[in-house]
Amino acid sequence: MAKTWMVRAGKRGALIDRFRQDGRVAIGWSEIGSLADATTRAQVVARVKAAWPDWNPYETGNNAGQLHRFRSEIQAGDRVVSYDPDLRVYHVGTVTGDYAHEPSFDPEFPNVRPVQWAGEAPRDALSVTTKNSLGSVTTVFQVPGEAAQEIEAVLNGRSAPAEPALSEVAAEQNLFEDLEAKAAEFIKDRLAMLTPRDMEHFVAGMLRAMGYKTRVSPVGPDRGRDIFASPDGLGLEDPRIFVEVKHRSGAMGAPAVRSFLGGRRPGDRCLYISTGGFAKDAMYEADRASVPISLLDLDDLVTLALEQYERLDVEAQRLLPLKRLYWPA
């Protein structure tokens, strides 16, 4: 069966007019030369490794996969889609021939496939689900079947399946929640990669963002706390906050919490952070403690980090560099 492929027209659709005028779709990777004799994925991987020896396995595999897809998986008779961001339309055509290496088309985009263009599908006529499936930044990928059918329907003058306004809103909200959840997991991955010492400094940075002055205990015996925080930094003003940071995979139990609380006096406040979480007996121990104590696991730490991120100083942001993503309200 014929498949439908997305082939992006360079950065911001810079080549889309050339695609249409010359009856081509093209991709870059010009340093690799012709792929005419690279008939297997393994051969393409070898070419990529030779051209970019410093790439990690993911970069090598991802780029080789796209090249092999364009060189060998796309077949004559398949549909191809390319996006024009200026006009907000998807140009749709049919692949009419085999792969070719044509530097004359564009020296930076010499790998081409011939295409007979059939028409356009306006982005605004498509459902949120289909627009999402076409949103990958990957240069070459196969369009899911339902999205391909919807594009064909719009191309042939038929409306996309009707979606009530609430369905559109729900689809956008589901997509946002999915991205938000994935972002949180990636942030947890970054925090988990910090060294124990860097984690202590990051937690101290969050406390500074909340208005406290902090002291991180030097390497070695920490006198029962990793971080001390107070309004004046000297402990002469309340609250006096004692912080223990355990950056490890295992959950902390009641004995660890009990040991940390030992020696604390009325008026002290305690914060115990364990990126490996807490056992039930540790939570019970904290609930019945005479000194107020908060237990934070890795999920709690991410939530607090996002709440305080804009107020973090340069040192703390350096340990967890993040960038803002805007989303329609």
Image (spheres, helix red, strand yellow):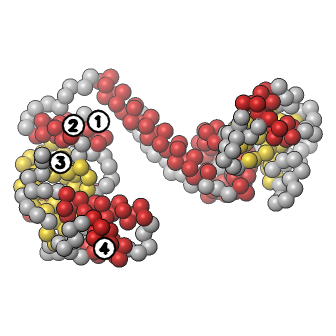
Q: CA distance from mark 1 to mark 2?
A: 9 Å
Comparing marks 1 and 4, which lies closer to the viewer?
Answer: 4
Comparing marks 4 and 3, which lies closer to the viewer?
Answer: 4
What amino acid does circle 3 point to?
Thr
Comparing marks 4 and 2, which lies closer to the viewer?
Answer: 4
Q: Position of residue 13 (x, y in %)?
A: 24, 57
Front in this rendered view, residue 14 or 127:
127
Q: Earlier in the sequence, mark 4 or mark 3?
A: 3
Rendered residue at 10%/32% (across/down) = 158
Q: CA distance from mark 3 to mark 2?
A: 11 Å
Q: Earlier in the sequence, mark 4 or mark 2?
A: 4
Q: Earlier in the sequence, mark 1 or mark 2?
A: 1
Q: Position of residue 325 (x, y in %)?
A: 46, 45
What amino acid does circle 1 point to?
Thr
* Disc assigned to residue 4: 3
Q: Position of residue 180 (x, y in %)?
A: 47, 39
Q: Is residue 195 left or right of residue 54?
A: right
* Disc assigned to residue 47: 4
Element type at mark 1? helix
Question: Against 81, is 257 above or below?
Answer: above
Q: Residues within 10 Å of mark 2 (few under 14, many from 20)?
A: few
Query: Which residue lies under the disc numbered 1?
Result: 129
